[in-house]
Image (spheres, rainbow, N blue to C red):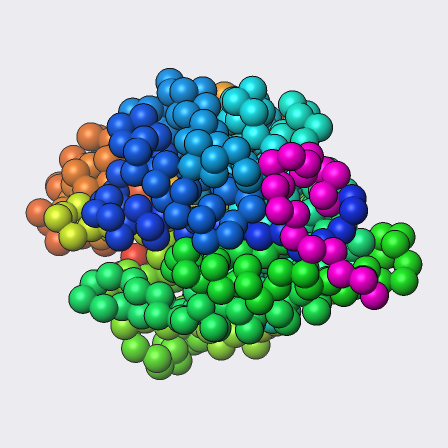
Amino acid sequence: MATEPMPARPGEEAFAEFLARGGVGLFDGAMGTMLYARGVFLNRAFEELNLERPGLVRDVHREYAEAGAQILETNTFAANRFRLSAHGLAGKVQEINARGVALAREGGGGQVWVAGAIGPLGARIEPFGPIGRVEVRDIFAEQARALAEAGVDLFVLETFTHLPEIEEAVRAVRAVSSLPIVAQMSVTKGGVTPEGVAPGEVATRLAAAGASAVGVNCSEALAALDALEGMRAATALPLAGQPNAGQPRSVEGRNIYLATPDYLVAWGKRAVRAGARLLGGCCGTLPDHVRALRAAVAGAAPAPPPPSRASPKRAPARATPVPRAHKSALARALTEERFVTGVEMPIPVGWVADDVVAAARAFAKAGAVFLALPEGSRAEARMPPMVLARLCGGVQGIEPVVHASCRGRRLVRIQSDLLGACAMGVSNLLVVTGEPLEAGADARDDLEVDSIGAVNLVAALNRGEALGGSPIGEPTRFHVGVRLDATAHDRKREVSRFAWKVDAGAEYAVTAPVFDAKALASLLADLPTRALPVIATIWPLRSSREAEFFEQEMADIPVPVPLVERMKKAEASGAAAQEGIAIARELAAELRPMVQGLQVVAPGGDPAAALAVLEGL
């Protein structure tokens, strides 16, 4: 088969024409690596350099062009309104992107194609994050419009890890321009995305969204090769590959890429044999890498596309979700509008759970139908709730409700934990955001997704879909509960968040401890829907100090002054525990007409108080 040489002057030919006629094209390397090596700090917006230090950016472009790159990516990777806002630059989207195009054009001397670089938002989007899809499309369309008006030859969407986000980005770009779009994702071992989506699925969905070429970047070379091979089997679109220059090594606190140009050359030859049409490099790729790659693949012919150019059949339809009433006994009872009772039992320190299992038997005899297991403090040695749920699963007449907390977990870790919980027989979940780390100089944000995003994830798994939208086979069968706070300071926010949880797929709600029945009645009246059954939580107070703890340390759960005074008087006479149980029974009587269930907390892990309240019901 005759080979197509690299065009000598690609600037004289439209990029779309080049894609149509065949041949191999060469991207540049790592703009970020080059700027960092020249003393630019990582905590600043590299894109601002288009305005502040244009000569530096132009010089980097020139070095890559002189090394043989035919396609220069603009220094606009994060030049969108959302990411620029963190640096006070949201109002300069047009200016930064336009200048970025001009600098690439100048650095290439008019002899290269200029690709408008667009990267991800760096935050979770709907349904797993707070950024709505309409807003996502608007943000990407604004940047794409600025790049198109400045005269780019094509767009490169790169380093995305969440397939639905890059799909929205492709659609947004296509809505404002007919120029070619090269859509690239980052992948991990085996060529799958960090969220587990197979390369064939990626290629098929990006093609459907409107991409002109699909591929992979910012990934380990072998993983990128696996991805290209998987994409080749799924699409006839041109393929693009821009891996990192090997694995980074930490040297005195800096990530250094030590792979030689020969490493990238060897990869490039394999990539062309796998069908790649567009080559280049990402992190750590310097002009020397590009120069060597140019010499190695000039005149090479990529492997032909698969015999059939028709899109492959999509994955089979997702399995039918399990009906709610079939998920668990608790779900059945709530579906049938039967009143339910349960107990929340703290998880003990250590690994021995005999006392909890014994308490579960006692609770079942007292009429409880569920045992809620919250996640304990991460500073203490406690087993995970799902493990304790498995240990208590053999107790007849009572079902575990596992608290699923988002704190300290990446979204992919939450997904893994949920699949494990389902495999271990857990059906009932209470999805909570979780308590934040204590404030301090060393405190860090450990929350990637909150309870609303996690409920959306559970709902997807219940439909048989993983985080990235790919099928998981048999769907999970989780009965999904959420938290509701009757005395939240920001009532409007609590009500709106509850509505979002309902929309996400919540099936029942459990309140925070309630000490004021009127407050709960007021909240229930404000909710936009009562489609969900509500289970109210009762906490038997043990002392006036505990009552004051809620007032001082958990300000969103205040104890009314009259109850505090009752506990003080009872404590003076040595009858605080009995008075706390009496108050809990009174609250239960007030709350029962408003809700479909009651949950009694076993304070301090002592089941006696909870049993006393249950028996009073």
> Residue 201, located in which quarter of the rendered image?
bottom right
Q: At x 52% / y 22%, what residue is drawn?
A: 150
Residue 433 % position (x, y) = 41, 46
Up the image or down, 53 lies above or below 385; here it is above
Residue 229 % position (x, y) = 70, 67
**Is 17 within the magenta?**
yes
Residue 416 % position (x, y) = 53, 65
Q: At x 34% / y 41%, what residue is drawn?
A: 59
558 on left or right of 423: left
Q: Which residues are drawn in magenta?
A: 1-19
Q: At x 44% / y 68%, what residue is drawn?
A: 261
Q: Quadrant of the N terminus?
A: bottom right
25 on left or right of 217: right
**Is 101 within the magenta?**
no
Observer-nearest of 334 and 195 = 195
Up the image or down, 403 lies above or below 86; here it is below
Observer-nearest of 432 and 283 = 283
The answer to whether residue 17 is visible is yes
Residue at the extreme front: 8
Q: How many labels does the image show?
A: 0
The answer to whether residue 508 is visible is no
236 on left or right of 144: right
> Residue 85, located in which quarter of the rendered image?
top left
Observer-nearest of 18 and 160 = 18
Q: At x 23% / y 68%, what residue is drawn?
A: 251
Residue 232 % position (x, y) = 75, 61
